[in-house]
Image (cartoon, grey):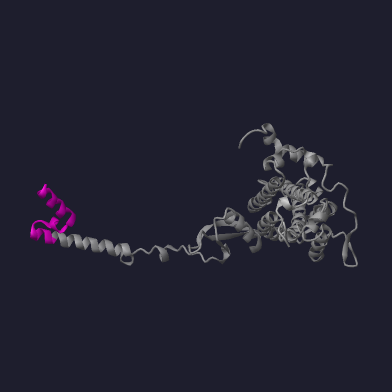
Amino acid sequence: MTTPTAEQLDRKTRAALAELLLAMADDEFVLGFWDSEWTGIAPVLEEDVAFASLAQDEIGHAQALYRLLTDLQGGDPDRVAFGRRSEEYRHARLLDHPRTDWAFSVARRFLYDTADAARLDALVASAFRPLAEVVAKMRREETYHLLHMHAWMERLANGGDEPRSRLVHALDHLWPDALCVLSGVDDGPLVAAGVLAEPLAAVEQRWLGGLAPVFGRLGLPFPFRRDDDRLEPRTAPPAGCRGPERSDDFRWLWEQFTMVYRSDPEAIW
Amino acid sequence: MTGQPMQVFEVFRREREGGPMQHAGNLLAPDPELAAHYARELYGRRQESVRLWIVPRAAIRDLDDPDLLQPPFDRSFKKPAGYSTEIKRKLAEARARAGGEAGDDEDDDPVVASGRKGVEQG
């Protein structure tokens, strides 16, 4: 496999790569802001520090991805991160939901982190080397995030009636939108160019295949049926997986995280 | 929450390879797994540690009996400093005795001696 520089990618592949980078960056960015809302109010002080630190990690990943994007197509990473209108963000619908309760935030982050891990697996040997390098660093941090979220899923699932029922309720609510994490990107040109190792549909099957035994063991909702070797969702993912329609909750979050930037977009920090 | 009672874990950290493990602080967690996660965040998230030990406080044998640690008799002879203090005292006494006999014990001091020599030359 040759290793193309950004200039050597054809126009269609570059456009698809930009789409992928923006989708991934926005996923990490918006999740980071939602989860940072637990700062000061997490169940225990230690978890408060830990969850805030995880949220900061996601903002760091978003920063690296926004930089890749602006290296590819020009522009300023901060302007991409903070200077767009709310309907211009391309995060998955899974990240349109508010923080809600602790079980909800744990369930959302678990679904996101596991899907993201499957996505990163397909990018770590990317022919677009700058992305492969960022992904290699991200995976080292995500390994720990996954351990942390597995620990919490187990504890809520086995932690008695109330934690379990809250977790089940959250998963029922979130599953359809979780399928959006691995969709909404034109993956054909990326696979053809070796930027992405396999189509997102295959990444999704790998993700679900890994989750099936975990959800089986914990007895948690897993709304898929086996069709030959494939896991088919019982309900189709929603339309507009990555916008432009957004929830009021996301618009509220956008107002919050762009507030300072909008007060003076030309300010030098 | 998890339904388990919280326990105290003491955390030790090594700042750099080859350095000692030093007490960093403590934290509350329901079990050793989450304790390890929290230790990583509280004492390692800023890359300030290369190794952590996470020990349940219950595993620590606590000893603070003053009869064992602060016994009433003089123990200065067990301390290196105690020994050197005693030696210095004896040396000073010996010098005082010698000085009394020779009349000018400052000649023993090379700094003072050379200083005096310099004055003579000037």
Q: Tally the marks.
A: 0
Residue at x 71% of width, y 47% of height: A72
Percent x, y of residue B78: 33, 67
Residue at x 54% of width, y 55% of height: B48
Q: Which residues are magenta?
A: B97-122
What's the magenta bit mostly, secondary-structure-wise?
A: helix
Q: Nearer the viewer, residue A84 or B101?
A: A84
Residue A199 placement, left or right of B84: right
In which quadrant is the C terminus of chain A drawn?
top right
Q: Nearer the viewer, residue A175 or A128?
A: A128
Q: Nearer the viewer, residue B30 or A174?
A: A174
Percent x, y of residue A104: 77, 51
Percent x, y of residue A35: 71, 48
Please determine whether, in this image, residue A159 is positioned above or below residue A254: below
Determine the image quadrant of residue B40: bottom right
In which quadrant is the N terminus of chain A drawn?
bottom right
Magenta highlight on residue A133: no
Residue at x 16% of width, y 60% of height: B95
Residue A169 placement, left or right of A52: right
Q: Nearer the viewer, residue B108 or A242?
A: A242
